[in-house]
Amino acid sequence: MSNLIDRVKSYIVSKIPVKLIGNFNQRNQPTYLANLMDVDRLHQILRDAESGNTQDLFALYRDVILGDSHTQGEFGKRKLGVIGDQLSIQPRDKKVPEDVTAARFILDHDIDDIDGWLVACSHLLDSVLWPVSVIEKIYTVTPQGYRLKALVPVDYQLFDFRHGHLQIRDTDPNGNLLPTAHDPSVDRYIVHRGNLLTTPDNWGGPMRSILFWWLLGSMDRDWWARFLDRFGSPFMVGKYDSVDDKSRTILERAFSSAVKIGGLVVSNETQVEIMQAATQSTGEAFEKFHSIAQREKSKLIVGQTLSAEAQSTGLGSGVANAQSEVRQDIRQFDAKMLCHTLRTQLLDQILRINGIPGRPPRITWGAQSPVETKATGEFLGNIRNAGIELTDEGIASLSERSGLALRRATTPAPSPQGFTAFSVTPDQRVIANQADDANDRIARATAADLSHAFRGSLAPIRRIIAESESAEDLERRLTAFYADWSPEKTAAILERALVAFAANGAA
């Protein structure tokens, strides 16, 4: 049995990547394609990609992101919505010691401090538009075991779909492409697909639908520039007698000279008028079409358009809230997909090659929006007032959603309606319900009035009352807390606090 375990360990160690193999020479990048792009050329690139040759398609994706400020800005928003938040690591099950040990090992590993961490996560998030993104993992040997050294993005020009599935092309020591390719092993690579499409990767992913809007929007700008170059300045119109060819010739020569000298000298019988193109109305048409193209790209990338440009939606229309909710859904999906990929393809391997027991911990990247956080707080307050509390599983789920490490409070929080210094059993609750209604109403009113009375510098009294176990304990706590006050003032505070203590049923 021990020999079998040793062979398994040797096999695992042999699979640990300690040297980079995806050494791509950036001089082999395809030339800039966007400046020569038209509809026919774009269709040809898409057909080539569908047959497995994606080099030109991914090169065009590169050019679109680099050359279109709107697309680049929206794509940046999509990524920052995830990696701009704090990364949280929690044990898979806090009741299982092995899971707690695994989470502690990952925390001590400091994966977010390794070389290229944020660049690698940003590259993985490229697959929200690209069909897939790949990262190569590199480890180093330390006295404590194997430690993650670097995460290196794999260039899209190394992707090969000629055999119907994703492969990584081989390179020579100088980074030049070789005709061979290999499958992306999970021991060496992280393969992330961060979109909802189920179409083959070589069909282009969500970015494909942007290409035509980008092309028409770019052509729109080119057309507008040509229009202004031709008709942006006033132009001259000459009139002559149809039978007077001599005057026509003189007028043509005068027009050609007017470009240099800026004026004309003509006879009285010749007429010259200065005409101005209707650039304002024509410019509005170009602007509207360009705005439509930009909005369509924003809808796909971030799910809304209000964050890119100011739009009048009407008072109380709720459009802004609706679009914010859509963007929040997209952000949560991106974070969940990225965290799942990192947990299954990175953290699991780190634990396995170092012989750490336990399941890979849960990781969350991205927290709730302020609106959701406020709604969650109100919900927790409502269920507490109803006598309901979260279980340990519920606290773990809430920690994952909020991105914060939460635990149950050691002392109960004060109730907004008054103060309760002890828990009530079911039998005690039945006896209380049978009490006199008039006295019960008086007690509730008194408790509410007194709770509102303790404000400002007296606000800590609420907590002291809630934590006190008896009237004597309350007197001792208050006397110590307000020791620097005058005896008369302290006595008045103590009297009011004891009344509040009694009004809340803490006898």
Image: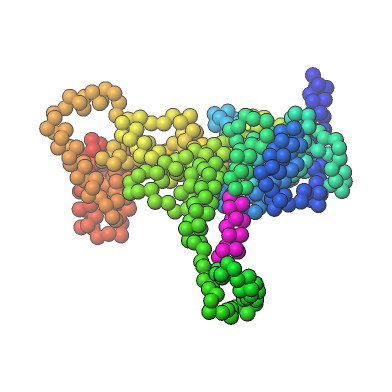
Name the spot of residue 101 as percent of width and height, x first: 62, 34
Q: Main secondary structure of the magenta part?
A: helix
Residue 222 included in the magenta stretch of the image:
yes
> Is 235 left or right of 496, judged from the image as shown?
right
Return the residue found at the far top. Answer: 1
Counting from the top left corner in percent of width and height, residue 78 is at: 56, 45
Residue 506 percent location from the top left of the image: 25, 36
Q: Return the residue nearer the eye: 121 or 298.
A: 298
Is residue 139 visible in the rendered image? The answer is no
Closer to the camera, 393 or 437?
Answer: 393
Q: Residue at the left extreme?
A: 438
Which residue: 84% across, 47% down? 175
| Magenta span of residues | 217-235
> Could you tell me which residue is drawn at 58 percent across and 80 percent down?
265
Q: Depth check: 69 or 502 in front?
A: 69
Residue under the point 67% across and 47% down:
38
Q: Quadrant of the C terminus?
A: top left
Residue 506, compared with residue 459, is above or below; it is: above
Residue 182's quadrant in the figure? top right
Residue 179 occupies quadrant: top right
For the question of whether residue 279 can be seen, the reply is: yes
In the shown orientation, is residue 232 left or right of residue 20?
left
**Was residue 420 drawn as part of the magenta stretch in this picture?**
no
Q: How many marks?
A: 0
The quarter of the image holding the N terminus is top right
Q: Position of residue 459 (x, y in %)?
A: 29, 51
Foreground residue, 280 or 155? 280
> Which residue: 21% across, 46% down?
450
Q: Is residue 409 left or right of residue 480?
A: right
